[in-house]
Image (spheres, rainbow, N blue to C red):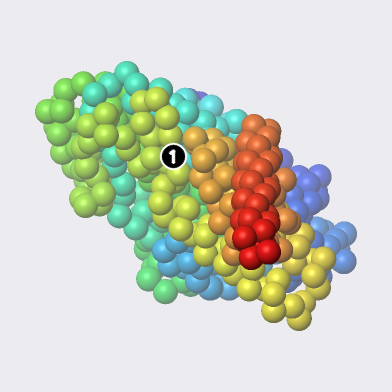
Amino acid sequence: MEKISDIYAQVISKENLYRSAHMAARGRRYRDTAADFNFYLEQEIEQLHGELAAKTYRHGRYRIFNIYDPKERNIAAAPFKDRVVHHAVHDVIEPIIDKTFIGDSYACRKDKGTHKAVDKAQDFLRRKGYCLHGDIRKYFQSIDHDILKDIIRRRIADQDLLWLLDEIIDSAKQIPGHASRGLPIGNLTSQFLANLYLNELDYFVKFHLKARFYLRYMDDFLVLENDKNALRAMRVSIRDFLKNHLALNLHEAKSQIYNSCGGIKFLGFRLYKDHRRLTSDNVRRFGKRLKKFAYLLEKGGVSVADLRSKIIESVRCWAAHSRYADTNGLRLHIYEDLAKKKPCLSALLKDILLDGKLFFRERERERERERERESKNRCALCVLHYTAAVAY
């Protein structure tokens, strides 16, 4: 690949900065520093353009907080001004560098994503007998800044752009434990740079180890073969490459070889050769979410319309994701359980959880239950009449 050069002017152009401000504001236009920035948009863009042109721009302070999804993660949220810069850099260089990524890298890429990765993984699973499922220990926290900068310099020759990228990478030093390692989870540039970092692994596995059936979703990767011993040898080679070339450690407990017939757990799904299911962790977390929603509906105290809207949106996202697995029975079971225990919530979510065939199946079940009730009522009525006749 020819090195990228003479592109800094495009990155910091006012047109690109305006476009980046619009992209960064999606979904958060009236939150945190986004509202202030957009209220004085022209002045802010003018000032930011001047700072970038004069190379006086300095990255702002991160806001650090924790989320649990499902395990605890430390999230570093950059000020809105810096998110605009992240978009400006990413949106210009990502389409150029993305062309050099292998086809079976699926994270944070246009026309890729989780569901296409799952489709490809299941396709590989049908063809091969054994699967090496690899995972990297604490990946984002372990990315070495110097190695990352060296990888970038093999792709980019523009010194001004390299200065800006170094400023973004070095901004992680303000986060505890990130003096020379780690990228903030939450930055758009962190996702892209983390993908670029492990592109080195992709090339090693595909072209040095000659692994044809290989795919990766960020730090989660699969290698499939019919020879189990070949996979054992690959695991050793991959472990050594990660340690010696990228200063990363393979998660030994999670990086195991499985028989394809028993299925594999990948990206929230349990994949088999002829079907797929959601993992039990996913279903359990969704169940807890429904209990929380039911509690909030019963408790009240907030805008019911807003709450119902949030519940519908959350459940609709989960239902759309769940349809990529064989979950007709699961969704029907969830609905029936809600109908018994939380009828107010089940009525709200019925059309979301039960679509198409499920809706008609549930309607048939309701008719069956109605017929059973009528039959019981007739029997009870007959018994009542018989008892009255005998007594008479």
- The number of numbered badges drawn on the structure is 1
Horizontal side of 49 relative to 255 (left or right) equals: right
Q: Quadrant of residue 37?
A: bottom right
Q: Where does the image place residue 84, in percent across and percent down from the top left? A: 70, 56
Kindly tell me whether residue 190 is visible in this rendering. yes
Left or right? Give the position of 246 relative to 274: left
Residue at 22% from the left image edge and 42% from the top image edge? 256
Indicate the position of residue 160 as horizontal and vertical percent values: 59, 48
Identify the residue at horizontal 29%, vertical 42% (top origin).
134
Closer to the camera in the image, 38 or 213: 213
Q: Is residue 213 left or right of residue 1?
A: left
Q: Nearer the viewer, residue 357 or 197?
A: 357
What residue appears at the point 75 percent right and 67 percent down from the top-left corner? 307
Asked which quadrant contains residue 4, the reply is: top right
- In-front residue for pair 167/345: 345
Bin the neighbour count of mark 1 within 10 Å (Cα to Cα): few under 14, some 14-19, many 20 and up: some
263 relative to 302, above or below:
above
Q: Give the residue pinned by disc 1.
A: 277
